[in-house]
Image (cartoon, helix red, strand yellow):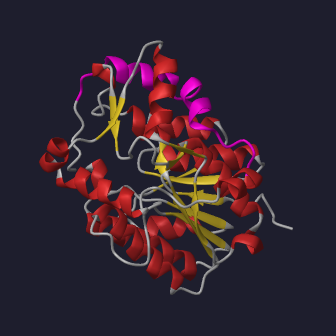
Amino acid sequence: MIDKSLPILVFGATGQQGGSVVTALLRRGWSVRALVRDASSARARLLADAGVELKHGSFDDTLSIKAAMIGAYGVFSVQPSSPGGAVTDEEEVRYGMTIADLTAECGIGHLVYTSGGAVRDEPSGVAHFDTKMQIEKHMRALAIRSTIVRPATFMELLTMPGFGLNEGRFEFFMRDDQKMQLIAVDDIGKIVSEIFEQPEKFAGQTFEIAGDAVTGHDLQRLFSNAAGRQIPYARFGEARLCESPFLKKLTEMMDEGRLAGGADLAVMRKLNPELQSFKDWLGGPGRSSFEQALASAKPWDFEK
């Protein structure tokens, strides 16, 4: 039996994915430790108030990472990526590899890494995914018990500025009848906590995770119902794609199936029946961000 008094060290605990993992692990009775740059920040204080053990350090400080791993049972690994503007692609790869190496060196019982749904063993040509491909390959070469999850497109992405909701419309990657898998960030933590609960079952596995699949028609209906008025859906037009090579490449990956998602949703539901549909998310946790998107004209720089 796993000793839950031995902590799981969570990277990115003050962020979206790491925060969801912290919440899910605490709910299941695990001891949780987090590496934080600033223990006095508001988010770090919230973690401490919830019972999380804070360790000071950063991705650039190898000694602080090793110190945080002492006595830990498991590690959840996620790194900031270049589209967020905080790190370069090279730094993301270095951080991910360093955590994996130190996990092996420190004799950690289980490493869980969150990658990306469009990641494969061959490059995609999009750095956001290919950095994670490199980290995955490095992990598999190490003598450690590990599991890699590849989350589908975040539901939260659909309510970010730049997709037209403030203009009473919505445009995205899929055709009207083309399905794309999505996952709520909170649900990533639910799946990761289940992996730590059953290490033998998930050791050595790499698999995609998602909570729902929607078409363009579905988005038009769901957004219209939520807004109380018609929100027409359209795929990105050719003019928009010509202006943005990044969006054009992702749209091509959607048609290839790589961005559409390949998770087995029935298996996902068995893994955790609480996974949210996009309808449930939009009417619950996502309601506030949806309303903000309807009112916000702030652009989003897709090329970051």
Residue at image point 32% right, 69% down: 124
Residue at image point 27% right, 69% down: 125
Q: Position of residue 158 (x, y in %)?
A: 41, 36
Q: Is residue 198 above or below residue 143?
A: above
Q: Position of residue 18 (x, y in %)?
A: 53, 50
In depth, the one of 203 and 268 nearer the eye is: 268
Residue at image point 28% right, 65% down: 127
Q: How many marks?
A: 0
Left or right: residue 151 versus residue 246 is: right
Left or right: residue 170 versus residue 243 is: right
Farthest front residue in view: 177
Q: Is residue 13 visible?
A: no
Per the rendered image, the range of residues in magenta is 272-298
Left or right: residue 261 versus residue 29 is: left
Where residue 235 sits, quadrant-wise, is top left
Residue 190 falls inside the magenta stretch: no
Q: Is residue 142 above or below residue 82?
A: below
Q: Position of residue 237 (x, y in %)?
A: 22, 41
Residue at image point 48% right, 12% down: 228
Report the quarter where the N terminus lies.
Answer: bottom right
Q: Position of residue 224 (x, y in %)?
A: 46, 21
Residue 290 falls inside the magenta stretch: yes
Farthest right residue in view: 1
Q: Is residue 144 visible?
A: yes
In depth, the one of 269 and 190 nearer the eye is: 269
Q: Is residue 89 above or below residue 14?
A: below
In depth, the one of 177 and 161 nearer the eye is: 177
